[in-house]
Image (tube, rainbow, N blue to C red):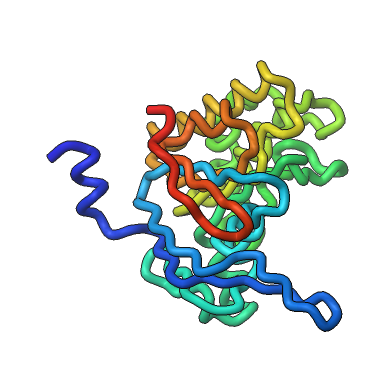
């Protein structure tokens, strides 16, 4: 069985059905997402694309359990996260999701090591175990020699690599990335995308990335396009 056939036969890691998200603005209901249906297979790398205001970041936040839908289901690993309480959702996120943001979201008063360690403070790992996990994650992003540096002592690309190490350190099932190269120059952005590609290809991570950049999206195995809250599948991209 080929890798493509194996993926087709596998159960989706993410299974979204009839998903809607509306917001109330005064007396008006604003529909951001309308009847979204989407499957993402284990170890798939997809890019969510669309113009500003199309709902792509809203969809990413729903998949990551940061926000909850108005109606519909979001099953991830067989768990309908739309049915979880706030506390259950927080525990689920900590165990299953790694986050990569456009502006890194690093704590300026913490070193690279301490920033990467933050998600592990919510676990029952010992200090020695946390240290081993952090050092391993920083080695993956080739920043072992910068672990004692503070964010303001690092370049933008290095800060994003610290953020990627932080996303990896808990060995999450799913990595969500919101415009991960949006604040980087082209060369540095390519380096970060190559690293994400490596996480997908070599570590088998499932990645859902929001981007407006077709070159960044071409790194994904599949692009899906949002227009005014409606999802439209795109032809396969990249490899």
Residue 158, given in percent of the width and then of the height, sits at 71, 27
How many numbered marks, from 0 up?
Answer: 0
**Depth check: 220 or 111 in front?**
220
**Residue at the image point whose x is 86% and y is 42% from the top:** 108
Residue 23, given in percent of the width and then of the height, sits at 73, 74
Q: Work out whether residue 139 can be spotted.
A: no
Q: Work out whether residue 126 can be spotted.
A: yes
**Residue at the image point whose x is 61% and y is 45% from the top:** 50
Instruction: Name above or below for residue 200 compared with residue 172.
Output: above
**Residue at the image point whose x is 56% and y is 37% from the top:** 137
Answer left or right for 194 relative to 122: left
Instruction: Name above or below for residue 121 compared with residue 189.
Output: below
Quarter of image, res 88: bottom right
Q: Can you say which quadrant of the picture contains the C terminus? A: top left
**Depth check: 132 or 163 in front?**
163
Quarter of image, res 62: bottom right
Answer left or right for 173 relative to 49: left
């Amino acid at each position: 069985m080929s890798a493509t056939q194996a993926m087709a036969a596998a159960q989706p890691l993410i299974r979204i059905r009839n998903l809607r998200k509306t917001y109330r603005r005064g007396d008006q209901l604003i529909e951001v997402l309308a009847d979204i249906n989407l499957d993402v297979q284990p170890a798939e790398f997809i890019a969510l694309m669309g113009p500003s205001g199309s709902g792509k970041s809203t969809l990413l936040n729903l998949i990551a359990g940061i926000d909850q839908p108005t109606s519909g289901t979001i099953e991830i690993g067989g768990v309908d996260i739309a049915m979880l309480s706030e506390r259950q959702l927080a525990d689920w996120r900590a165990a299953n999701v790694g986050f990569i943001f456009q502006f890194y979201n690093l704590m300026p008063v913490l070193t690279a090591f301490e920033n990467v360690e933050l998600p592990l403070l919510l676990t029952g790992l010992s200090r020695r175990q946390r240290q081993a996990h952090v050092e391993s994650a920083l080695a993956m992003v080739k920043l072992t020699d910068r672990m004692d540096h503070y964010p303001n002592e690092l370049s933008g690309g290095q800060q994003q690599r610290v953020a990627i190490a932080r996303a990896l350190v808990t060995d999450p099932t799913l990595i969500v990335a919101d415009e991960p190269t949006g604040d980087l120059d082209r060369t540095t952005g390519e380096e970060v995308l190559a690293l994400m590609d490596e996480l997908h290809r070599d570590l088998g991570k499932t990645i859902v990335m929001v981007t407006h950049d077709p070159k960044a999206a071409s790194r994904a195995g599949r692009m899906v396009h949002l227009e005014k809250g409606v999802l439209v599948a795109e032809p396969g991209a990249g490899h």
